[in-house]
Image (cartoon, grey):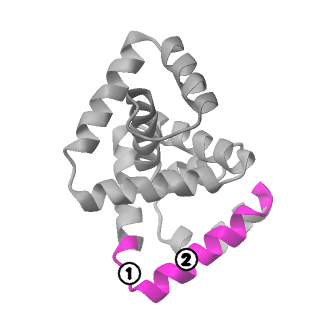
């Protein structure tokens, strides 16, 4: 999800720059200032991501749009936490990122009622302190089936400041 949120943010930014999305003047001016402050490498990456998004199937584009809307509905604190988790994810070695993807795909493949329960627990737990989250995590079946290496990866992602 994190990559999709980033792609959605980047795409919407590019769309706003190109005038394809109606926005108020203040937003257009703000986005223009942000665009002008970006390095050539960042601009190039944004354009590349936008092109990738445009060539994606409609279902993927819609998922990215939904992720973008969900991201914008988050509180500033939640957005900051998500950005931190994304940075933590990107800092993982490729093997660690693959382990995270693998585990998340397992959740995606569960029946809807199980996924809903997992999402509810996640939402409930994210309101807890890091120590409380760690305690619940260590008591979970999920945690017990992880290797030490996987535990370190997930600990870094789920409890960044621990």
- Mark 1 or mark 2, which has the lower sequence index? 1
The residue lying at 60 percent from left, 50 percent from top is 72
Where residue 117 appears, x then y in whole percent? 56, 83
The residue lying at 72 percent from left, 51 percent from top is 75
Which stretch is magenta? 108-131
Q: Are marks 1 and 2 in contact (CB under 8 Å)?
A: yes
Q: Considering depth in this image, is 102 or 145 the residue closer to the camera?
A: 102
Whether residue 152 is situated above or below residue 30 in the rendered picture: below
Q: CA distance from mark 1 to mark 2?
A: 10 Å
Q: Which residue is under mark 2?
A: 118
Q: Is residue 149 magenta?
A: no
Query: Magenta residues: mostly which secondary structure?
Result: helix
Badge 1, how many Cα within 10 Å: few under 14, some, many 20+? few
Q: Which residue is under mark 1?
A: 110
Let me know if residue 74 appears in the view: yes
Q: Label 2: state its secondary structure.
A: helix
């Amino acid at each position: 999800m994190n990559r999709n949120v980033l792609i959605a943010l980047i795409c919407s930014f590019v769309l706003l720059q190109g005038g394809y999305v109606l926005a108020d003047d203040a937003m257009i001016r703000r986005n223009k200032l942000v665009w002008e402050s970006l390095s050539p490498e960042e601009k190039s990456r944004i354009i590349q991501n936008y092109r990738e998004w445009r060539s994606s199937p409609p279902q993927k584009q819609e998922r990215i749009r939904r992720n973008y809307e969900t991201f914008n509905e988050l509180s500033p604190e939640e957005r900051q936490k998500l950005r931190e988790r994304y940075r933590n994810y990107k800092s993982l070695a490729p093997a660690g990122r693959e382990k995270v993807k693998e585990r998340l795909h397992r959740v995606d493949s569960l029946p809807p009622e199980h996924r809903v329960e997992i999402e509810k627990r996640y939402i409930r737990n994210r309101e807890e302190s890091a120590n409380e989250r760690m305690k619940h995590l260590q008591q979970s079946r999920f945690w017990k089936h992880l290797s030490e290496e996987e535990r370190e990866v997930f600990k870094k992602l789920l409890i960044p400041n621990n």
